[in-house]
Image: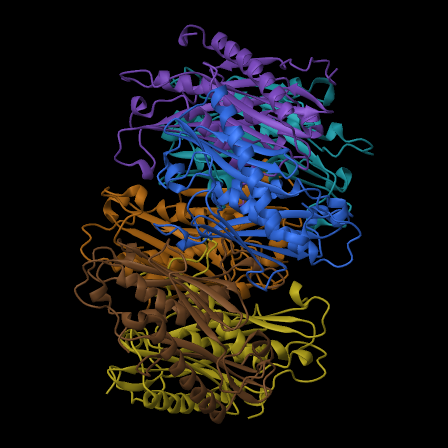
Chain colours: A brown, B blue, C purple, D yellow, E cyan, F orange
């Protein structure tokens, strides 16, 4: 039994609010238990310099924890040196979202998905991917004159890990802290892997443990796909 | 008549939500029309180096606009160079809050009030002060063993300006953009000035105009004091 | 009686030297008591990127205290992080000078007014504005082929404050340190306000005190306008 | 058939030179085909600030590509902003090495493993781990007075990927560029996983493909363990 | 004949003003023709971290050109990246001054000599050394309770170069720009070399040319020693 | 007798390996005793911004010590602030190489010579110049369609110094540390000086000592020219 009474394969309560602010075309508040992330997606009709002159578009992401999202307070990353963890996470979010976008169909524009963590209780990177996808859908819907839908599929992510030798799904902060192995898995609506990142910091894991974690992760992302479909309703074909 | 039908001396709709997140002892979502700021206050039981060894405390503030809070998207201030406007604003918020705190009574600890703008529609700095005060109250209430209340008074702030030659209260972004004179006024619950910052960028103003603006500002901060009192209810003596 | 025998409404001794160096078209050494600022104004016949292609010009300012201008020695701001105080001051100087310049008449060029403090004894920001205006006049006079004078008016600035409960004019460092309220006021030759910045750090002020401070400030800027006129002689119509 | 005639499950030629320089206690030149990395391990008898006062040690890694290691020349990372890719790689190397070190037995000292790429032809991060382990062994051997061996196991890493729909082992740059899926796998001498990082940039992969890649990776790291054992000879119990 | 009518071995007019400001114990304005440098020397009764706990002192220097000291305006070095030329110059000034100071006799304190160029017309680094020495003398004189004079000798510096194939002394900017070889020579009052830096950018020089340049430089520094002695009068034993 | 049995005028053993890596057109490993530097030269067919549109080329250099090249480990210069010593050295290398290149004949392209120190035992900057010249030759040889050879001469460099009052050639680290005077001399194959940098940190030197050092340096660079000729064989006319 987990400390919050969940079963090993049970997700926390997920809640998705679209249109949370009006200042960005995609604006989604996603909550997974106490973890709360504001995902906004902005469209820039110009391309980054390294894509200048091309017909294809780009999707990128930025991730940030607000100082008050955790205790003790997290210092702002303003010193010109972005934290290695932050860099890794925002690169992961960007790659995950790009995996389901057809850049030719998006056309010569850039979408930036900003994931700002308002409250952090574990799973902020995977929650950012799951919520960021919804913001991306809304931002793309706001673009006028697209000839075809650039979205090839949906994408969602979840964490799994080994806590007290038991593989569990969707770790909160307390479990994450105690886990010997931590894995983040990104899966499309069609069930294809986009990314697997499994790490045993000062620990290792066997082939059997890997297999058990992947089964949990696929079950979890399946459920998240359904939650995304429900939030998008008629705006997404499920 | 103003573009949103308000009278010249009418505030926008203000809404204050205490305990918006659980991750910081003070956590307040404040909305002024569409302007939305998350103010969290964190307590650090150690002092900044320049106060080391003293018996008094310190209150400081940081201000930040989330990238999606405005369009076009605002670039994150991660390049090691904090924007001059940001620096000015967070110094103003810090000074304003310190004006009502007795640092001896606070004791050797530091409170940081983070004001993160989720949606920006004018007045973000004054809204940060008004909401930051509530977060500060809640953070101070969370400290155990304080001998006396370090708060001497409440504090609130509002913007006034001259738009189309008419002095108006509580400018939104559209009015702010059109204003020839812009003034931010910070006033305590007892009606004392803490700060006046009046600026005519590429414009100037007369003594009569100054007088009219100050009258509007004092009426506005009076109302904000009442709104703060209501939000704090029994936690603040009004 | 003030510590240096001045009356409450008395300025320090002001001295303005035009053409202090030959390396910049405007080069003014201004002294207010011991406070000494070298103001140089340079003309750049290209515009900053954000104004590229426009027909109007721009005036900007930078402020800096030399390390030996104060004791203990002030560390140089070379670490990539310009001090918040410096940023605020140079923004104030820039806005104040721009308030009296017609950017259309200046044409597509930028003037930078550099205010380097050689000795600091209070009032460095207001002295920079008062001296910077003279440097600006000389820089504009050096531009060949201007169809019309871009200067609409003169501008000068002074500090006022409350020291031992008495409102006083033109505070030196010792008074500034002891003041409960500090206010900088920028006024044009015609008597219009450009900027008011009044601050009670860990203190507040009443409506009556505000009124007394403004009267002092206007009398002070009146005298500075006359001192500027004398320095400019036939180069300025007074 | 691969472009360099290798079989799908064939490693490139690996060569390990211990004691390449005398300036660091661990100094290993490792070559994998044309990929060449100099791994040096230095021992610092003091701990980083966040471990101060503890009895346990720490192992960290830094990764860097020399400018001439690739064409066009790679700009040096001196601008105060370390590239996201670099950050990710050096964090991966550090975690991988730490997984086989008993920090209590290492005692209160820090070992830094520097991996400088002299020539880059794909697989630089995995080659850094495989060579870095040898440098780590030599650095630990240089410490006098250790009560017990802090090394619990050996560790090696290899890349696998899907190129033209075929899973292949140990990709060089040309294959890496063409791969739709890229995976780095870190495995201990005993066959336990330390880390799995699989990424489909603008692509995805199925469960079957994942299984095939893992089989290749385990065969490859098995061979690398033997190569490491041979290089270490009597200095390591295989 | 040189463009300003000087003989090949003739110095420009040198003028030294001691006590130029009162804010630093050593404060010297030195002019060499139009080149003008403000040298201030400040005493810090604590040592830099790397000397902590020692009985000896330290002398360091910083060099800076004010933006208006040259045209076009020189950008301030605030971006976190100090210009290579600036770094070289301030290291040269520091080494030159340290060569005549007995650090044991100075005791556990640090003197910083700031050389801020108000107007630049060639020879700013050598003028900084010559003037900086005077500021250093005055700063050392301000220290109370020194058991013995830490100054072993005086030090002065001059530039020489080859312009139109002729070796000349004390180049101004126009000559410096045209020179094929540029050499800075630092010599003590007793005639010992402290530093020689000779450079042929896109040019080279012969043994005979080197000999001719050194003769000019020694004659020049001899004269500067006399000028320094005169400025210091009874405060220095000549 | 020197600590390593060399005569006062004897070079260490020099070894030059061309084509050390294949990733850059010029790639030279140069060893002087234990000092080991990898010099790679890369050709960029575009010019730096400040030369844009010109017909002439540019040669620049960067210098870096790998962390493990010395003990204790040298921290990487990633903090946005390149060390003053590094800046000085890479500027010296660049000037030295440019002195023998005809930029018109090189044409509108830039060559960057990277000197990465793998092991540091004194004389790294002069060894970088001597080895960098060979890498430069190979990079120029790789350019197709040059009308004429841009190289006017060869260039080599050596250090000399005064150790225990004796002038010696080619100091290793132990001698460099003990030297009272340190001088780096850069000389062309034809025997012309390119650069002389002599420094007495906390010491001075006489005219006679200077003369003795220059004789040693010229004998040393003569020998290095022959070593360079041998390494270049038929690729350089000696």
Residue E71 visible to the viewer: yes
- How many numbered discs? 0
Is residue E224 rendered to the left or right of residue A133? right
Q: State which quarter of the image contains the C terminus of chain A.
A: bottom left
Q: Which image quarter: residue B161?
A: top left
Residue E221 visible to the viewer: no
Task: Relative to B220, say whether C211 is above or below.
Answer: above
Is residue F28 rendered to the left or right of residue C14? left
Along the viewing direction, whichever of A35 and A62 lies nearer the viewer: A35
Task: Relative to A174, say whether B126 is above or below.
Answer: above
Q: Which image quarter: residue B192?
A: top right
Q: Position of residue A15 (x, y in %)?
A: 45, 71
Residue located farthest toward the top when viewing the structure as drawn: C234
Is residue D205 rendered to the left or right of residue B155? left
Q: Position of residue E102 (x, y in %)?
A: 73, 38
Q: Residue at x 20, y 53 (%)?
A: F146
Along the viewing direction, whichever of C25 and E213 lies nearer the viewer: C25
Task: Relative to C52, say whether D27 is above or below.
Answer: below
Along the viewing direction, whichever of F230 and B153 lies nearer the viewer: B153
Q: Residue at x 37, y 52 (%)?
A: B73
Q: Position of residue C18 (x, y in %)?
A: 48, 14
Q: State which quarter of the image contains the N terminus of chain A.
A: bottom right
Q: Position of residue B59 (x, y in %)?
A: 65, 47
Task: Relative to D187, say whether E25 is above or below.
Answer: above
Along the viewing direction, whichever of A149 and C69 lies nearer the viewer: A149
């Amino acid at each position: 039994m987990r400390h919050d009474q969940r079963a090993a394969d049970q997700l926390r309560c997920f809640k998705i609010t679209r249109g949370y602010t009006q200042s960005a075309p995609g604006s989604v508040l996603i909550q997974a238990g106490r973890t709360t992330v504001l995902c906004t997606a902005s469209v820039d009709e110009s391309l980054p310099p390294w894509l200048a002159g091309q017909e294809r578009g780009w999707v990128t992401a930025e991730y940030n924890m607000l100082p008050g999202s955790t205790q003790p307070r997290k210092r702002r990353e303003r010193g010109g040196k972005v934290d290695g963890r932050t860099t890794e996470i925002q690169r992961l979010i960007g790659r995950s979202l790009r995996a389901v976008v057809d850049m030719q169909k998006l056309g010569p524009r850039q979408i930036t998905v900003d994931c700002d963590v308002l409250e952090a209780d574990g799973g902020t990177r995977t929650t950012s991917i799951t919520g960021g996808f919804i913001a991306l859908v809304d931002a793309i819907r706001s673009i006028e004159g697209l000839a075809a839908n650039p979205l090839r599929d949906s994408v969602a992510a979840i964490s799994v890990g080994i806590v007290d030798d038991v593989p569990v799904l969707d770790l909160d902060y307390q479990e994450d802290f105690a886990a010997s192995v931590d894995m983040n898995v990104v899966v499309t609506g069609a069930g294809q892997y986009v990314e697997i990142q499994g790490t045993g910091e000062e620990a290792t894991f066997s082939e059997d443990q890997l297999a058990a974690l992947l089964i949990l992760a696929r079950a979890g992302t399946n459920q998240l796909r359904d939650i995304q479909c429900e939030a998008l309703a008629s705006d997404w074909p499920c």
